[in-house]
Amino acid sequence: MRKLLNTLFVTTPNSYLALKGETIVVTAGEDHLGQVPLHNLEAICTFGYMGASPKLMHACAERNISLTFLSTSGKFLARVVGESKGNVVLRKTQYRLSDSTNESAKIARNFIFAKVANQKWILERMTRDYPMRIDVPAFKKISATLSEYLQEILMVQDLEILRGLEGQAANHYFRCFDQMILQQKDDFFFKTRNRRPPTDNINALLSLAYTLLAKDVSAALENVGLDAYVGYLHRDRPGRASLALDVMEELRGVIADRFVLKLINKKIITGKDFFAKENGAVLLTDEGREKFINAWRERKQEPLTHPYLKEKINWGLVPHAQAMLLARHLRGDLEEYPPFLWK
Amino acid sequence: MLVLVTYDVATKSTTGQKRLRKVAKTCENYGVRVQNSVFECIVDATQFKQLKLKLMDIIDSEKDSLRFYQLGTRYQSKVEHIGAKESFNVEETLIL
């Protein structure tokens, strides 16, 4: 497995990114903010109104460095995509399978199966780690319900039914979500999932985590030569990276949700790190966002043994591992797509 | 791994100044300048070899000198900084 390189986050407003030799130079007006060699970078992620020189975009595309532009609130705006290199045959297979709803359902089923299985294990882990602080019987009951859904998901051949089951399972899972918040109950409470814009602290955190994860997964898919925009569970829609969202389903719980819970339960992020806008949108302050990014990067460096590959990698490489496995399945080297099943 | 690159280039002549600029530029492409003629480069074995070859091509071995210190992958405990101009590590969180 390859080495995970670093991500450069640019948050200073009005900064400009330029290429100098083999390095990226970040300046804000007259100030020189920093210079980093490109070979140390995996991705560049900017928040706010950043200028970037075409020469730099050129260099990033050539070196497969993903360059992403997010708005100040972390909403995805654009990503610079280079030439689709890699395997035409692989991409055509991807398209062919996506045209057949039958074949799509087979792959989509594995995404959803893993998503629900991972959600179940998040609940199970909570009952093991904090038996005194949460309502164990309720968790066990929902976990059992999720097990039933898992059985059903295995039988389904139809995309619509699959989506229905996913929604119901997610409903059950999110019912427990509020209980998993163990600290800072006054500032953080979960009622339902809301977005565009998120209207409470938890949803603001979840949204940002999902955006960062989606960006990582897209880049990983492009890296193995797949088209991030042609999905199986998510249908084609202009501007939506459907396949990235597909692969992300199984990682949402284990990577993003658990990360957000950790930020709150370890009091890394507090109620002071948020502010509300007039329209009800809740956003992270600059310091809050910095803490968030810092913790996100640390999380990506943490090691785990990949449940399918049995190889020691760090969490940041999980999207890459899954993209590689999906490509192997599409090529026909693997009978079925092995989703990421965490325990 | 972390490689520390330091150099001394004789700048009496204009060709020497030219060499100095070239050496600095090449080092910049591979690492972060921590002091005037000191660079910290986080590179793999191939990149290190490339860097070495490029620098050897530029310098005049009669007058200039280069030193490479290989500090390995666990270099954190081996580096200490005191005083002004604290630089950043390209393997830690990069927020600019």
Image (spheres, coloured by chain):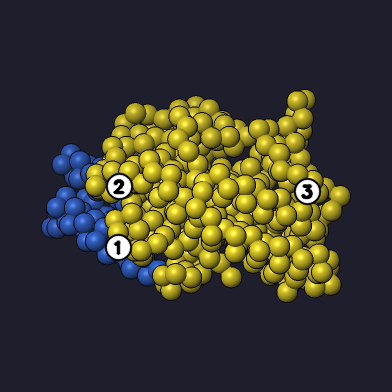
The hue of chain A in the figure is: yellow
Does label 2 or label 3 sit earlier along the sequence?
A: 2
The span from disc 2 to disc 3 (Cα, nearest Å) is 41 Å
Q: Position of residue A263 (x, y in %)?
A: 69, 55
Q: Residue at x 53, y 65 (%)?
A: A341
Neighbour class for label 2 at 10 Å: few (<14), some, many (≥20)?
some
Q: Are marks 2 and 3 in contact (CB under 8 Å)?
A: no
Q: Quadrant of the C terminus of chain A?
A: bottom right
Q: Which chain is blue?
A: B
Under tag 3, what secondary structure?
loop
The span from disc 1 to disc 2 (Cα, nearest Å) is 13 Å
Residue denoted by label 3: A190
Q: What mark, if any, has residue A333 been given in the picture?
A: 1
Q: Position of residue B50 (x, y in %)?
A: 21, 56
Asked if marks 1 and 2 fall on the same chain, the answer is yes
**Residue B6 or residue A257, whichever sits in front:** A257
> Given the image, on which type of amino acid does mark 1 rest?
Asp
A8 lies left or right of A177 = left
> Given the image, on which type of amino acid does mark 2 rest?
Thr
Neighbour class for label 1 at 10 Å: few (<14), some, many (≥20)?
few
Q: Chain of mark 2?
A: A
A145 lies left or right of A310 = right
Does label 3 or label 1 sit earlier along the sequence?
A: 3
Report which quarter residue B56 is drawn in.
Answer: bottom left
Q: Residue at x 47, y 50 (%)?
A: A105
Q: Position of residue A57 (x, y in %)?
A: 35, 34
**Residue B37 or residue A279, whichever sits in front:** A279
**Residue A194 or residue A56, whichever sits in front:** A194
Asked if one can make out residue A315 in the rendered structure from this viewpoint, the answer is no
Location of residue A259 with respect to B96 vertically, above or below:
below
